Amino acid sequence: MTDQVTNKQAPIVRVSGVEKRFGDLQVLKGIDLDVYKGEVIVIVGSSGSGKTTFIRCINHLEKIQGGRIEVNGHLIGYRERNGRLVEDAESNIARQRCEIGMVFQLFHLFPHLTALENIIEAPVHVRKVPRTEAIETARTLLARVGLADKANAYPAQLSGGQQQRVAIARALAMRPSVMLFDEPTSALDPEMIGEVLDVMKELAREGMTMIVVSHEMGFAREVANRVIMMHEGRIIEDAPPETFFTAPKHERTAAFLSRVI
Ligand code: ADP
């Protein structure tokens, strides 16, 4: 899909020198990453290497202690004051997050709302989209993820794969410029993984910019423009799948691949 990546002017996501600590534990040790329009980045690495923490930092679900993150040129979570970064107001952070769709491992749908109500919640209350317009968009999105007939179902009435597809539709409803996926299929029964990956492949084909933490190596091979290996809080490899899977530079990548493939 490299041919889709045409705009090399300014990255959609620019991560520079990001550091993250939980108490004394330094989990991210200086992460640099530029992601351009239409790119699909798949992040892999052993458990505990910092993948989830990193992706959560991108939409400021985690505070960072060093570096900066910009989406569409807007600083995320912080603003500059006298040459220093100070945490931004919650209302500004909410606005910044509109640019960033997030899909979690455990779906995180509102259990008391139907599929359709889950999807219109943020457009109506955060983006202030008129309700009728939001409903129309939600129906289109539900059809796009293959769930046109589930608009009035509650999460408990849906399978895990269906809930995750609603979660993807909900994230898309905000018209984000980048979608973050944190192990979107790892909580699913094997027979449901394919239906979620198919929706993600379609999104990639349509040119969505995506950052995906995943153990699905087949997806990475087929869909990623770049595969990134994290190890102990650092990016140690960043390569197109053709190179990543056949001729990794770092011995730890080779060792990781020999375990998972
Ligand atoms: P990965 O996604 O690669 O498995 P994580 O980002 O989940 O890695 O975790 C990286 C490290 O950060 C682990 O040592 C984990 O225990 C630690 N960690 C993650 N979240 C927290 C937290 N909220 N508080 C303390 N430590 C955390």
Image (cartoon, rainbow, N blue to C red):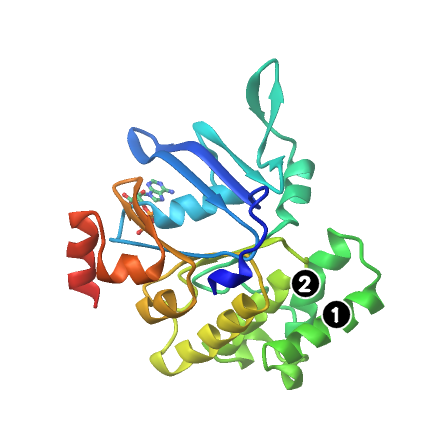
The residue depicted at 68 percent of the width and 57 percent of the height is 174
122 and 4: which is toward the camera: 4
Residue ranking furthest to the top: 82
On the question of residue 179 being in view, the answer is: yes
Q: CA distance from mark 1 to mark 2?
A: 7 Å
The residue depicted at 39 percent of the width and 50 percent of the height is 52
Residue 104 rendering spot, x and y as whole percentages: 47, 59
Decide: is 173 above or below 178: below
Residue occupied by mark 2: 173
Res. 218 image quadrant: bottom left
Q: Is residue 164 left or right of residue 26?
A: right
Decide: is 206 above or below 253: below
On the question of residue 111 being in view, the answer is: no
Residue 137 numbered tag: 1
Q: Is residue 37 left or right of residue 151?
A: left
Q: Amino acid at mark 1?
A: Thr
Q: Quadrant of ligand 1?
A: top left
The residue depicted at 56 percent of the width and 65 percent of the height is 109
